[in-house]
Image: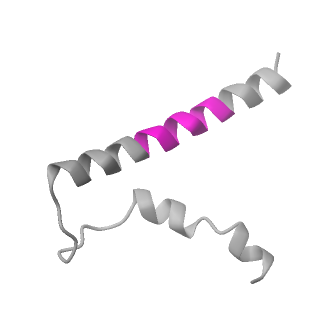
Amino acid sequence: MNIQNYFSSNEFFGYFFRKEDAQRPTNFSLKSMHFINKLSILMFLVGVLVLLYRLFIR
């Protein structure tokens, strides 16, 4: 493994911007789980941005 694999963001952006796959099963539980995961990732990133803002600006 090289160092570029550790900092690759392909899987992260692929999680948010991928097409619907006909082979994957879809039901309410799976859709709600993915929505909650996406929401928690976004909330974490907003929290990190707020902390960085407070650290450097204030």
Q: Quadrant of the N terminus?
A: bottom right
Q: Position of residue 10 (x, y in %)?
A: 55, 69
Quarter-of-image position of residue 16: bottom left
Decide if residue 56 is on the left or right side of residue 24.
right
Classify 18 as above or below 30: below
Find out whether residue 45 is within the magenta segment: yes
Q: Position of residue 20 (x, y in %)?
A: 24, 67
Q: Position of residue 40 (x, y in %)?
A: 47, 39
Quarter-of-image position of residue 4: bottom right
Quarter-of-image position of residue 46: top right
User: For this rendering, which residue is in front, 16 or 32?
Assistant: 32
Q: Quadrant of the C terminus?
A: top right
Classify 34 as above or below 54: below
Extreme residue toward the bottom, this view: 1
Residue shown at 39% from the left, 60% from the top: 17
Q: Which residues are magenta?
A: 38-48
